[in-house]
């Protein structure tokens, strides 16, 4: 079984994403109504991110195809990727998305998962514009939405007393991981500082994680995701010391639950299908954490072996049912590139 992103796999993932980026239905709206004027179709509400079943999946669907285009410029789907992005990433469409966010009752819309993926998308465009001229136009169009999300993070994090340690969209460690990558890449010092301060405030003194997971609809590991966040915000030596205390028995595969791929019984059930994503996101974290450990650290091989098992369970199921295939290729890409 391959454990790396190949051009063949990238083409498969690109086709999956392109087939749902502009597919409006079925659609699961997260939508607050202030009055009857707010009763609208998904595309009327969100002229860019109306596909892929829900807003955040559409955002990271665009991240996926643009990321794959950057990694593999000769993709057979390259022209389709450029065309669909060109049609949707217009100044008028983005301003309509921004106007939706600016409604008073939408201040918390897609917090924090959708916020994080929007910044990841902006970061991808920031990189892609160096090799693809159209990406500069798309990045400029997206800028008002990017600025709105940055402002929301800067406003929200200082008043967020506690982290959210769930394994679903509300997980704050995952959101801060993506947002921190964007902030460091784009040299946004204020956002970098606030995320680092928040991560330390929430997690610096966490010890002996018991890893009460998985739950029945998780697609993120609260334990491993927290470690991935701290890997980013702490200097290397400080992170290793923190990691030693956070998972002190990792070398003997404890907590055992982190090393056992989860069972998925019904991939047509959107919540149960989340568990394929948990296998993929665990593999992503396990591989990345293994690379961060000192040379010859026995924990690295333990993590790599666990990642291989998780990948073997999940990769065959990236496609097959819309409840999974509208989003799983994104997390498969993260895992294969880790």
Image: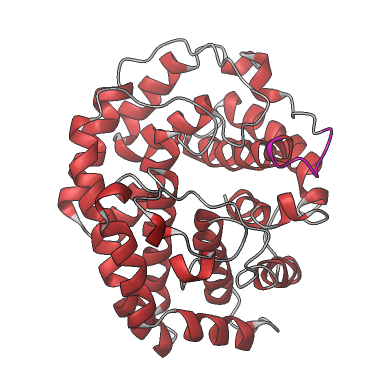
Outermost residue, left direction?
Answer: 190
* Residue 114 to residue 201: above or below: below
Q: For the stretch drawn in magenta, what is the main secondary structure?
A: loop
Along the viewing direction, whichever of 49 and 132 lies nearer the viewer: 49
In the picture, residue 127 is in which quadrant? bottom left
* Residue 309 to residue 114: above or below: above
Along the viewing direction, whichever of 55 and 259 lies nearer the viewer: 55
12 to the left or right of 213: right
* Image location of residue 252, percent across then percent down: 65, 14
Q: Residue at horizontal 40%, vertical 11%?
A: 207
Along the viewing direction, whichever of 322 and 281 lies nearer the viewer: 322
Q: Is residue 267 magenta?
A: yes
* Residue 147 to residue 283: above or below: below
Along the viewing direction, whichever of 253 and 172 lies nearer the viewer: 172
In the picture, residue 20 is in which quadrant? bottom right
In magenta, the rendered stretch is 265-271
């Amino acid at each position: 079984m391959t454990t790396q992103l190949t051009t063949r796999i990238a083409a498969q993932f690109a086709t999956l994403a392109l087939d749902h980026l502009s597919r409006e239905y079925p659609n699961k709206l997260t939508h607050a109504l202030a009055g009857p004027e707010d009763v609208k179709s998904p595309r009327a509400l969100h002229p860019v991110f109306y596909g892929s079943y829900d807003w955040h999946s559409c955002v990271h669907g665009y991240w996926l195809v643009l990321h794959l285009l950057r990694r593999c410029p000769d993709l057979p789907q390259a022209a389709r990727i450029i065309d669909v992005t060109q049609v949707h990433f217009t100044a008028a469409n983005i301003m309509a998305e921004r106007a939706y966010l600016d409604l008073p009752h939408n201040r918390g819309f897609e917090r924090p998962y959708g916020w994080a993926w929007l910044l990841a998308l902006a970061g991808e465009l920031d990189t892609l514009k160096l090799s693809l001229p159209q990406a500069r136009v798309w990045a400029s169009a997206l800028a008002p939405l990017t600025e709105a999300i940055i402002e929301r993070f800067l406003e929200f994090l200082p008043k967020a007393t506690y982290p959210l340690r769930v394994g679903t969209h509300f997980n704050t460690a995952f959101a801060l991981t993506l947002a921190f990558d964007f902030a460091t890449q784009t040299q946004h010092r204020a956002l970098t500082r606030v995320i680092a301060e928040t991560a330390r405030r929430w997690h610096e003194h966490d010890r002996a994680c018991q890893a009460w997971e998985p739950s029945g609809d998780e697609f993120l590991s609260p334990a491993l995701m927290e470690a991935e966040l701290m890997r980013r915000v702490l200097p290397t030596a400080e992170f290793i010391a923190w990691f030693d205390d956070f998972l002190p028995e990792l070398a003997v595969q404890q907590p055992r639950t982190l090393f056992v791929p989860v069972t998925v019984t019904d991939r047509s059930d959107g919540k149960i299908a989340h568990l394929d994503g948990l296998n993929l996101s665990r593999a992503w974290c396990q591989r990345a954490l293994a690379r961060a450990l000192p040379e010859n650290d026995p924990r690295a091989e333990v993590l790599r072996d666990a990642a291989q098992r998780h990948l073997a369970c999940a990769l065959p199921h990236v496609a097959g049912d819309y409840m999974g295939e509208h989003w799983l290729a994104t997390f498969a890409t993260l895992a294969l590139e880790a």
